[in-house]
Image: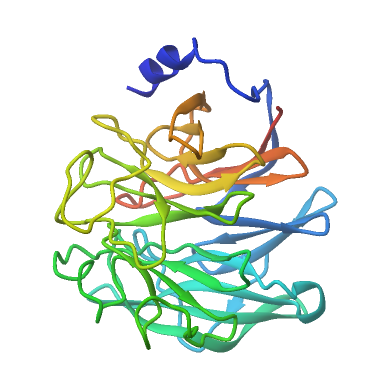
Amino acid sequence: MFVALVAALAVLPPSRSFAQPVETLLSGLDYPWDIEARDGAIYLTEKAGTLGIYEDGKLTRMPVETSVPVLDDRGGGLLGLALRPDFAESGLVVLYQHYGTPDARLNRVIEAERTGQGWRETRVLLDGIPGHPLYNGGRVAFGPDGMLYVTTGWTERRDRPQDLDSLAGKILRVTADGAIPDDNPFPGSPVWSLGHRNPQGLAWDDTGQLFAAEHGQSALDEVNRIERGGNYGWPLIQGDETGSGMRAPLVHSGRDTWAPSGLAFDGVNLLLAGLRAKGVLVIAPRDGAILEAVSLGERIRDVLVIDGDVYAITTNRSPRRDGASNDRLIRLER
């Protein structure tokens, strides 16, 4: 299906074209989940519980010491990563951690600091986020407002995404210290938006508008323009369906399956990492038009723009399967 999509989009004039070949910067990664960059270094999580630093052509892989063990099972593990806005001074990072047991799963958001050849948890910012073998959300990111945004999955519980008392199926917003901001839409709650199924991508454009990418139930994957207090309908509506007080997606995949994960803004357009699509989609943030579909032949987990260059990581093993993932950090020429 994705090959057909690429062919169909070949007639569209992209604003910026990708060139070949793709450059492999690192190979032999094991299920990396998030990449971030600061001051010439790339930071990446692997879900077994490491946070590595790629610098000067070398990866230093370091364990993360947490107060409760990381549950590395199926789609759960050490997932999202965000560098605090004051990272240059504080050296502090934020991580999304899956924990518990296969029969009793939870997620939490922690802060960690560098300690010699590793990282150590310093405090818990959010806890008690419901967990699932596959649907955990998992992305953390600081917005232009300095607040921390967190995506959570619906955990196959139809009541949770529409329940403001549950943290599942939401985009959450807290301060860098984990406090609930006074201007959140629901007093005393970290919920920023609701009605999400399994959002795994967050990005802001140059106006400060937030966008999120999320997995659909069966195809109908979405990119949404996120508004304060917005209800994005899951599980009551999807695709082109409508509901009172519920927001339609900016764009959805229709009968195709993208399995979207990471999302980035390149200064003009949104770049969407596709797992099942095995590539990167270029999406216009104003109207959701798909301008380009870059087939890479591997499951793309996250995408990052650094000084105009596009970097991506693969997770080639499905979370439904066991075994090695054999992944790469790559750079795409534009």
Compared to residue 166, the image places residue 219 above or below, namely: above
Q: Is residue 60 visible?
A: no
In the rendering, at what x and y percent does residue 24 appear? 69, 35
In the rendering, at what x and y percent does residue 182 appear? 48, 85
How many numbered callouts?
0
Colouring scheme applied when the structure was drawn = rainbow
Image-based side of 150 in relation to 29, left or right: left
The N terminus - image quarter? top left
The quadrant where residue 136 appears: bottom left
Image-based side of 235 in relation to 306, left or right: left
Q: As rendered, which of 242 and 257 lies closer to the eye?
A: 242
Q: Residue at x 57, y 74 (%)?
A: 147
In the rendering, at what x and y percent does residue 99 appear? 39, 77
Q: Is residue 213 visible?
A: yes
The C terminus - image quarter? top right
Q: Residue at x 48, y 62 (%)?
A: 139
Q: As rendered, which of 101 and 191 lies closer to the eye?
A: 191
Compared to residue 295, the image places residue 323 above or below, namely: below
